[in-house]
Image (cartoon, rainbow, N blue to C red):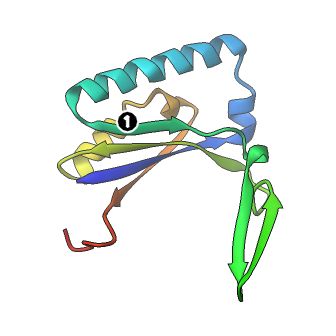
Amino acid sequence: MKFLCQVWFDTAEINGISEEDGRRLTQDSVDNDNRLRESGHLLVANALREPETARTVRVRKGETAVTDGPFAEIKEHLGGFVLIEAKDMEEATRIAATFPVARYGMIEVRPAYDIRFPDE
């Protein structure tokens, strides 16, 4: 089964870490990703730029509206995502617990599926 692991950060906390801690976190994350890739669990892992770099797109009654940044003022922000392969939610949760970024935020683990085959 595939599971999407969303990496959520407390914006103030992650912005407050030192440059050295940031470099260490990045290297620890790369090392962990490599281990998961080698074990066949990691499918995709990407970090996201800061929320201020985002655009929010809505289409209502055929009209497209685009605004800069996130939709609402946020205390936490989505910092990245990892798509993994695991036999079940328990294994997926154990894998997510290995993510070094969990020391600074939280990982939401959610089953993913192909919308063409929702019952598989």
96, above or below 58, in the image: above
Q: Nearer the viewer, residue 32 or 103?
A: 32
Quick check: 72 left or right of 95?
right
Residue at 49 percent across and 34 percent down: it is 102
User: Going by the picture, which residue comes out furthest to the top?
Assistant: 20
Say which quarter of the image contains residue 34. top left
Point out residue 93 in the picture as x, y percentages from the top left corner. Answer: 32, 45
Does residue 69 sit above or below 34 in this rendering?
below
- Using the image, determine if residue 29 lies above or below residue 83: above
Residue 44, image x and y in percent?
A: 39, 39
| Residue occupying the far front of the picture | 62
Residue at 21% over, 28% down: 39
Amino acid on which disc 1 is placed: Ala
**On-image quarter of the C terminus:** bottom left
Horizontal arrangement in the rendering, residue 101 relative to residue 96 (left or right):
right
The location of residue 56, given as percent across then percent down, is 73, 62
Quarter of the rendering occupied by the N terminus:
bottom left
**Residue indicated by mark 1:** 97
Which residue is nearer to you in this view: 74 or 37? 37
Q: Vertically, is 54 above or below 105? A: below
- Graded by Cα atoms within 10 Å as few (under 14), some (14 to 19) or many (20 or more), the crowding at tag 1 reads some
On the image, the x and y values in percent for residue 3 come to: 33, 52
Q: Quadrant of residue 118?
A: bottom left
Residue shown at the point (32%, 43%) measured from the top left: 84
Rendered residue at 37%/30% (across/down) = 98
**Numbered label tally:** 1
In the image: residue 41, left or right of residue 105: left
Label 1 sits on a secondary structure element that is loop
